[in-house]
Amino acid sequence: MSTIEPRRESVHVALGERSYEILIGRGVSQEAGARARALGARAVAIVTDENVGALHAGPILASLEAAGLRTDLVTVSPGEGAKSWRVLEDVCEGLLAARIERRDLVLALGGGVVGDLAGFAAAIVRRGMRFVQVPTSLLAQVDSSVGGKTGINSPHGKNLIGTFYQPSLVLADTALLDTLPAREARAGYAEVVKYGLIDDPAFFAWCEENGAQVLAGGPAREHAVAVSCRAKAAIVARDEREEGDRALLNLGHTFAHALERLARYDAARLVHGEAVGIGLALAFRFSARLNLCPPDDAARVARHLESVGLPTRIAAIPGLAPDVDGLLDAMAQDKKVVAGALTFILARGIGASFIATGVAVEDVRAFLLDELGAPASA
Ligand code: GLY
């Protein structure tokens, strides 16, 4: 591994008057109290889930109280089911019952589910309250806590109800990842690899060298989180509302969302980052099949994902044997379908991804037929 000293990183998300900092490093969540004070809050309501709250709420509450802030805790059940109208209502009512005023802060303590839910509640309670993200999963630290996508799910699909609403601060405390189950860490790592595949081939090569250390913790992890946040911040700064380049962040996600839908969002079989691992491998193999990308690059992507234990084939999902029409149908329900044509993020090589509109459904069908006949690993 190349030598990287443990350090604190700061990434600026440049969005004019909605700009904010992402602080990355071990222990940064211990600054929650001082940072909330600096933001002018008198009270902070933490929104968390039962699992994360039991592990991490105590020290953050202590930091807030040591800074003289009034605190409250709004706790939801763990899992994707919390991204619902019912739980959103509970959170909004919980924030109002906590007498949190507009100058105060909502603090989202958790993974992507809590961040999306608490951020959406913050966006609508009292017509908009400031909020701080304290992401506790690798996936949330490198992706969902940054960039202001908030919302809940609908029976029509994931994340279909929500708003772009930027946090005032992100505290990405890498020490909080020490308690992350290995499977969740691997799943988040798929989103790290994604940044290399989008436009940073040197970072992908670094991941090939250091992926195991990122998962093990230590300075490689901080570096990976910082590079990922910097990459995402740059994209969000030039296209906050996904009218152009931000769609690149969906590399692998059209396939991933369809697979998650077919697996009925059953985390025992497939979590989002695993679906992204498969989706990234599929996006590169599809690009190679369309003669856009060297087949060696597609093989290299799958090799690296598999080297850290991520799935890269549809057959690797337990109990899922979709037919091609079911899969195409699930893909067509993804929100990135424009006027009946499929939009994919494809690649001309590692670090050379681009937005491909109007991809022919027949090409997708032929590719998926091959993939559905393939064994579980490359
Ligand atoms: N996770 C993709 C985005 O934030 O745009």
Image (spheres, rainbow, N blue to C red):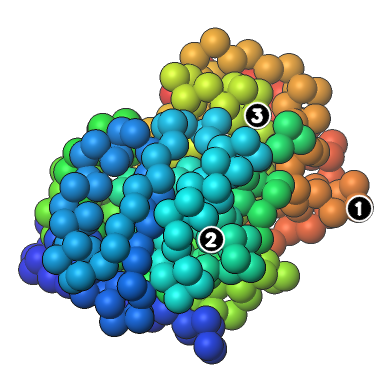
Q: Quadrant of residue 67?
A: bottom left
Q: Circle 2 sits on which residue?
A: 122
Q: Circle 1 sits on which residue?
A: 339
Q: Quadrant of residue 5?
A: bottom left
Please state which amino acid type lies under the numbered disc 3.
Answer: Arg
Q: Quadrant of residue 356?
A: bottom right
Q: How far apart are the two marked residues, 1 and 3, measured between alpha carbons?
A: 21 Å
- The disc placed on residue 261 is 3
Direction bottom: furthest residue = 16
Direction right: furthest residue = 339
Given residues 267 and 294, the one toward you in this image is 267
Residue at image coords 59%, 30%: 260
Quadrant (top left, top right, bottom left, bottom right) of the C terminus: top left
| 70 relative position to 75: left or right | left
Disc 2: residue Cβ within 8 A of ligand 1's nearest atom:
no
Q: How far apart are the two marked residues, 2 and 3, measured between alpha carbons?
A: 27 Å
The picture places residue 4, in percent across and down from the top left corner, at 12, 67
Helix, strand or loop at mark 1: loop
Disc 3: residue Cβ within 8 A of ligand 1's nearest atom:
no
Please state which amino acid type lies under the numbered disc 1.
Answer: Ala
**Mark sitting earlier along the chain (1/2):** 2
Q: Is residue 270 above or below residue 120?
A: above
User: What number of labels is visible?
Assistant: 3
Closer mark to the observer between disc 2 and disc 3:
2
